[in-house]
Image (tube, rainbow, N blue to C red):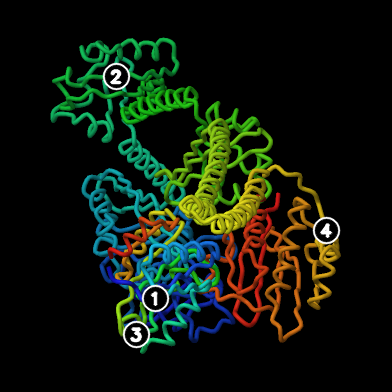
Amino acid sequence: MNDAIINKALASFVPALLLDLYGNLLSANDKARGLVQLPGGNTEKVHYDHLFGERTGVYWGALLATFQNGLQACVEFAGPDGRWTAWQLLAQDEYFVLLGHETAQPDKLFFHLPLGIQQFSVDGYPIKSNALQQAIWGPHHPIFIQPGYNILRDPVYRQIGLSQLFEEVAETGRSAKKEILLRYQENTVGDSIRLSPCYYEAIVFPAFNHQRQVTDLYLLLKEVTVQKLNLMGLEKSARLLESVVEHLPIGYVQFDHHGFMRRINHTHREFLKVRPGFGEGTYNIMSDPFARMYGFNELFMTVVTENKMVRKEIEVDYSAETIFTDLSEVRWMDYTLFPLQDPVNKKTIVVALINDITDKKLEHFMRTELQRNTEQLHLFFDAVDMGYATLERDGRVNFINKKAAQMAGVEIQPGCNIFDIIPEFRTPSPFLERLAQAMKSTVSESFSSYFYRVDKCYDFLVTPMRDNTVSVFIRDITGSRKLQKELHRANSQLSKLNRNLLNQNQQLEDFAHITSHNLRAPIANLKALMQLHNHSNEEEEKIEYLGMLESVINKTDETLNDLVNVVQIRKETDIRQEVISFGERLEYVSHELMLEVNQSGLRITTDFQEAPMITFPRIYLDSILQNLITNAIRYRRPDVPPTLHFSSRKEKGLITLTAEDNGMGIDMNRFGSKLFGFRKTFHKNADAKGIGLFITKTQVEAMGGSISAESRPGWGTKFIITFKTE
Amino acid sequence: MQLLNMIFIVDDDPIHQQIANLMIKRQGIGEKVKAFSEAQDALNYLREYIYEPDLLPDLILLDLNMPVMDGWDFLNDYAGFYEQLPKKIGIFVLTSSIDDSDRKKVDDYAFVKGYLTKPLSSEIINKLQAE
């Protein structure tokens, strides 16, 4: 029959196309050419897929496979005039013929369905699909181009369960659906290609014949990627929320409207050391004795009835609860209960957030204690009669007691910097330097300083503390300093008195020595002469002795007069002193001794430029100058013209007078210790009485000064007088 | 009693020299009395006649407190050469000083026979004679 049909068709009674085994078009009659719009009427190099496959989604391979499987191999599509033609594949020897016949648009719905739809045989071979379905699969999907493709055997679709969906529907005769990750879509983002999944809802439903036998299976594909991704996002969020609740750093317990615990998070389970078997749904906050003991049932009721949040800190002794927890400790807990509405049944649920604040409470307690101690310490430091302050190393004040603030004389608040607030500290001073040094030091340092502004003397002890601050202790030592000064003054006076006493003692000793040597000698002579006189019977002898007695008496008188002079000088320590000129006094004395000076040829030179004036008793200075000039004349060398040079200097606040002659000089090794002695002479000079230098020394020392000499025999002598200055 | 050949008086006080001279002669303890006002002159004499024992004194009465060279200087100098002297010379310190320190200091000089305090009296001269 086929042969007849084909022959008839090819004779142009019906539209017919002749194809080889590979789908290549061999020839077409005119009717067929018009329907398939064969370009230029040329059949060379035209393939079935171009004419039909691209239009219908049923490619040559699939069509041929259907045919070879003994099924009806048919494709339908609308021609240029809108009329639908169904093309059935028939075999003719080694060739194939497609015969077309006009249909009454029975599959119009199929092709215009706004969903992807595809017809499969019961055993899984694709028959036809609409354009949307073709777009979903893609033109190069094996389902269209692979000959003999069977969806039941596709390993990919078996893996995702699509194949099984077909089998289920074929077997049960009921439609079934499944969400499948059908493919990945390539999206070009910049230089890279990103793959995004495409989710579809696959619905497979059966078509029956009159015997209620499944004849065909239809696959509907609907893209649900957006919905799926949204759902996945929601699921992810839900899981995240779940995880967050479970691992919140605080306890989370959820109760239903009736007080049954519906959820307890991991944190709180761990904290309570919840015993195995204790679970949600059995514990009720309203009836649990332990909860009631701490009033949790009332808190719950408040939240439910007043629909408000409550918060309470409770000290809980978990050792009283033996049913659900092994935590046998007393803990401070912070409970926050708030209401939520169940999104499903709209009833109020209560969530309790539970935080262990034991450490915080302890810290608070410790801080309170610390604060109390600090306050007590501050009260103590305010009570002590000593300035106390704690400072940062840069001078910032942490604490200052009342006494220290009072001692500073300015208001000092904690937080301010002492270097800014105390004016004395702004300018560099030895005190500031010592304070800054002590502030940097690692050991305690103490120093005292006087504060002009408050007229006080303070003693500072700066001690470095472990926390890198410094403690400063300040003691008012003004009183003791004054006492010290007075003591010092008394000491000075005592020392002066002592020196005077020593001096007087020395003078007494000197005087005893003088009397022993210089007064006893004439007395002894008198005694001897008297003995001689008394034992003599000769008148002449007696007269001679009396003459000698007179001589001794005169000499004794002279000695006594000298001693009286000396005593007078030593006694007159308060003799009037006046500001006198060395130059003027020397001129006066030189004039007095003019005769001796001229006779000796003594040349006197002076240099009083550096210290021209001196405060000294005038008669003493005249006497000193006279003795020095007399000495220079008396002990001059006969072979050289005598010279005497006076000069005055000011050294270390002291005025010195130097008299340097070019006379005979003295052997200081032999006579140095006796040079200024009473009645000491060192040269065979008839005029020498050994009293001048003694008097000079007495006068200088009586006024608190000193005299020394440097000399070499044959070179001259240099006398150096140092005057005490007021 | 042996009569001393020569007695030296070393003293700067001329009155004392005269008194001593008179007393020595009156007591008749020495033939010759030689007085020196300067200690240095006495030392010079001793050195000059060091090998002539007849010209050297048997006794020296030495004052301590003298100008230029005092009794101590004399003793220090004398200590340097007295062992070379051909005869022993008795040296007595005759001073107006009653200072204990002087008395003790004299003990340092082994060749000084005694410490006498002025005035020179017949008792002292008798004592000298006995020595």
The one nearer the camera, B126 or A635, is: B126
The reply to whether callout 2 and callout 1 are in contact (CB within 8 Å) is no
Give the amino acid at mark 2: Glu
Q: Amino acid at mark 3?
A: Pro
First reached walking from the N terminus: tag 1 or tag 3 = 1
* CA gap, disc 4 and disc 1: 60 Å
- Residue B6 numbered mark, or none: 1
Mark 3 lies on residue: B53
Q: Name the amino acid, label 1.
A: Met
Under circle 2, the secondary element is: strand
Asked if marks 2 and 1 fall on the same chain, the answer is no
Q: Position of residue A541 (x, y in %)?
A: 54, 58
Relative height, residue B100 to residue A259 (above, below): below
Chain designation of label 4: A
Mark 2 belongs to chain: A
Pointers 4 and 2 within a single chain:
yes
Q: Work out how far the residue at label 4 is from the one at label 2, CA to CA, in angstroms.
A: 100 Å
Q: Is residue B107 left or right of residue A13?
A: left
| Residue drawn at (53%, 33%) of the image | A480
Query: Which residue is disc 2 drawn over?
Result: A315
Question: For residue A344, what is the image quadrant?
Answer: top left
Please state the horizontal and vertical placement of residue A195, each as a whole percent of the image: 43, 64
- Give the quadrant of residue A332: top left
Along the viewing direction, whichever of A138 and A318 lies nearer the viewer: A318
| Mark 4 or mark 2, earlier in chain | 2
Which numbered dot is residue A581?
A: 4
Distance between the Cα atoms at labels 3 and 4? 64 Å
Secondary structure at numbered mark 3: helix
A505 or A324, which lies in front? A505
Q: Is disc 2 surrounded by few (<14), some (14 to 19) or many (20+) residues within 10 Å?
A: some
